[in-house]
Amino acid sequence: MINKKITTFLAIVLLGFSFYLLYENANNNSNNYKPRNKSALPSYGIKGAVEYFNQINANQDKGYIDYNDVFEARKEVEKFASKNKNKALDLTWEEMGPDNIGGRCRAILIEKDNSSLIFAGGVAGGLFKSTNGGLTWNRISIDNKNIPVSSIAQDKNGVIYVGTGEGLVGSFSALNYTTSGPIGNGIYVSTDKGNTFSVLSSTIPSSTTSEWTSVNELVVNPINNRLFAATSRGVKYSDDAGNTWRAAFTGTGSTAMASDIAIASDGMVAVSVGGRCWVSPTGEENTFTLMSVTGKLPASTMGRIELAIPKTNSNIIYASVAKTDGYIENIYMTEDKGNSWTVIGPGGHSSFQPFSNQGNYDNALHVKHDNPKTILLGGIDIWKWEPSRQFESVTFGFYSSTDKRYVHSDIHTFATTSSKPDIIYVGTDGGISQSSDNGVSYKTLNKNFNVTQFYTVATSYWGAVMGGTQDNGTIMIDPNKTTNTKMTGIAVGGGDGGHCSFSILSKDVMINSIYFGSVYRSTDYGTTKSKIEDFYSKEMINYSGVADVEPGNSSFPASFVTPILLNEKIDDTNSKDTIVSVADEDLTAGSEYTFFSSNKSFPIKVTLSKNVKKGDTLKQQDIIQTRFFVGFAGAVWMTKDVLKFDKNPTWFKVAEFSKNYSNNISNFAISNDGNVLYFSTRLGQLYRISNLNMAYDSLTADVRSNNCVLDVSNLTVPFANRAITSVNFDPRNTNNLLVTLGNYNNASYIYTTGNALDSMPEFKSRQGDLPKIPVYSGIIEMSSTKAIIGTEYGIYTTSNIFATNVTWTEENTNMGRVPVYMIKQQTAKGSSNHGTIYLATHGRGFFKTEKYLALDVEDNNIVKEMPKTFRIYPNPIRDNANIAFTSKTKTNVTLTVYDLKGQVIDKVDYNNCVSGINNIRYNNRNLNNGTYIFRLLGENINYSSKIIVSK
């Protein structure tokens, strides 16, 4: 019949797919961002993100994030840093982007003497400055820390103040002093127009000064230069540039969360604290009168109240009032400094729900300079009001990003100046927008404003990265796409993105997820995606309710950041699938015949053992196999059909446990051979599924079958009830498993086991001298015992994770202490990025290091005879190398020079290469005499050659 020995072709494929397969060019069209589907989940909004943040950070016994736990952790981080230890791995991080997509921005300041100088902040990414009116941005590094910017103000002397800590994300029903937003570092001040900043020591939060954990608003009184701050414990003011502070007023409710301050040109001050409003004619201490009384503003406690006062009419105050549940109460207006109030925007109508249920999260007001009776209201979108008309929506987050009415969903702040009142800046969940025509049309200004909050990262065989974000969808960055910069992000999924995967078997296939269990697959590089009902089985949908979620009852089918895992094999000798083919010509024994797998027609060449006639039926084991896993409440589901787009996949329930919606699955990890799958749950349980290689149909792979061969074990672990944030195998040894944990105020955050496949694995703490801080992700480097972990305070590393006493070092060079939610290393041999380590930061986008980039110089498919379309001469080279190559398209290319250990020695970019023959020159001044590997990469360009340098 057919010789079962696969020819040299498949051996080459095992080392590197890219040198055999021919792929169609990925679609170069940049997809528009698709905002969170508010209609599908109308009653949840930001709550999912808040609950997730709380779940991985709150102490498991207290149930909330205790400020004192955070303060203690920060002390440990600073003490650890003061030791100035040599870096264990000496890593340097390279920012990858996105350079065109922003993140949540709550504060924008236009410098009073220079309208082109603008400051803006991300709630998890720090402070940025633009010197050209927002066209481009540059990050301001402050103390190597992650500065969660929430407010910015400037006094009449030009001093700039930056408030930190996001207090306006959670429910206002309790109005306590805890928050599920990033906790602040105090107020920073600059006296040199933003070139340098230092923290005001009086505002550094501590156990005795917890009011400075969030500074939700900063405003300067134009009459006396008094600085007001809306803090997590009421309104404070300072008359000495922030050196000392006093409470603006005292009494019942004065120490609750303050959300806003508005000051009139005559010095009148209006504030909102704890869901109530006060007004003072001068802003002097204890001259504030409560407006939240019968006959004025709502007397019962509301949620968030936002305020605005026209620059040209100090008698008018506007108040946007949200209930404690986030829905609108009313929009109010007074024309007599608060003596009487009128409802101008009545709540309770389906046609006017500007916040949905998020009025405590996104709620902003702006009064137009040219008309004190025309306002813009920011909620999910921007609404406009003037006396002659009702409120009307003027921007739409679901429109194309090229539409003049597009502004990203969730509006947080407006900024403008008297000198250029027609120019309005808007801070949103997606960064910064600008109107230059007084709010008629808008454009996005996010160039290099990278404050994107990623939850996850995945990398492709060809060097692209993809990750799920908070309210910016799933974003892909492909450095090889010629229509973009190397840092341009492309939206390939909407909503709040979660786990995602690239296929190795097919370049154009990707899979991504959004909140609570919705998973989508694409066969055209993210341009289109499948429907849920065409991907999940009816049984899964009925079991989970994923297609008919009932928001508000917390009975969600999966975790907010839904775990998925794609496992692909090209040598699965346990496969039970058969390829059937009909010969289209006579063939002789010893000749090669190509079969095509049912998984994306992946080719398999075999040697015929006997003669075959035209029309004969040929059969071959389909060793190209895929397994895709998704975690729901109480179950893990698997399909072998994720790459079969011509059919609805068949699914198997490979694990089942108590269907507790508060105990959804949080992470997956699979062994190198694909036989063992670990998964964790939200409540600190760790499970193991064994014998997956022998499970292939409904009888053997479904735990409800009496013939199921799977072994599912609930393991005993020393970290029960903790938030398990990541689970990863050692790439070199499947018996080694690394587990990381969240939750403040615990003794240990990292565990390993050396017997992960035994019946009772033993886990040991690897905390060592690491500060006691939440750890979100961890990997064991693919070629060593080194480990890299991502924490709330950035990256830490150790040279030996299995040492008796593990020692750690901080390694945040070029990145700062930004939260790192996921770490991935490309371990696929033959890939263009083999060994590269990628980070998903929650506030600064993607980063990578090529410290461990492996060229696989021993692999014959990497270093081979130069193709005719690629030539380097002379060889050996003395001064300059001439490089000639042919490209099918216009492209940018990168030349990377490696030594024979696979270490990067030099890297040079060549832009704007033409379609056809190109000639470029490389100067070898950075190279010593010796042998090197030159690799040239670009779109449809992947050439390598061994070169000798002899000077």
Image (cartoon, rainbow, N blue to C red):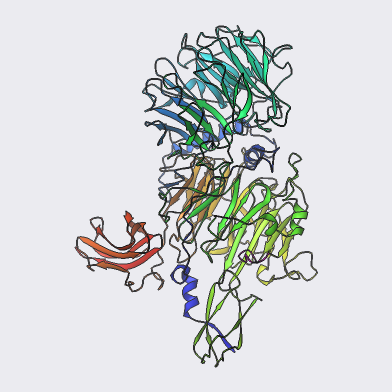
Please provide percent x and percent y for residue 84.
41, 40
Asked if residue 552 is positioned above or below residue 113 in the image, the reply reads below
Task: Say left or right for 825 vs 883.
Answer: right
Quarter occupied by the C terminus: bottom left
Q: At 51% from the left edge and 8% from the top edge, which residue is drawn?
A: 266
User: Residue 23: percent from the left, percent from the top?
Assistant: 48, 66
Residue 798 vertical placement versus 179 (above, below): below
- Residue drawn where x is 53% and y is 34% of the image: 74
Viewer-closest of 863 and 198: 863
907 or 203: nearer the viewer:
907
Q: Residue 906 location, x and y as percent?
A: 31, 56
Q: Position of residue 817 (x, y in %)?
A: 48, 39
Query: Is residue 34 visible to us here?
Result: yes
**Was residue 642 drawn as part of the magenta stretch in this picture?**
yes
Q: Quadrant of the N terminus?
A: bottom right
- Give the image quarter of residue 566: bottom right
Q: Count the numbered circles shown.
A: 0
Which residues are drawn in magenta?
A: 640-647
Corner quadrant of residue 816 = top left
**Magenta stretch: dominant secondary structure:** loop
Q: Would residue 165 be seen by someone viewing this image from the given angle? A: no
Direction from residue 109 to residue 671 in the image, left or right: right
Above or below, 858 against 661 in this view is below
Q: For residue 795: magenta?
A: no
Depth check: give the residue in front, 219 or 433: 433
Closer to the camera in the image, 936 or 297: 297
**In the picture provided, is 75 more to the left or to the right than 879?**
right
- Furthest residue to the front? 388
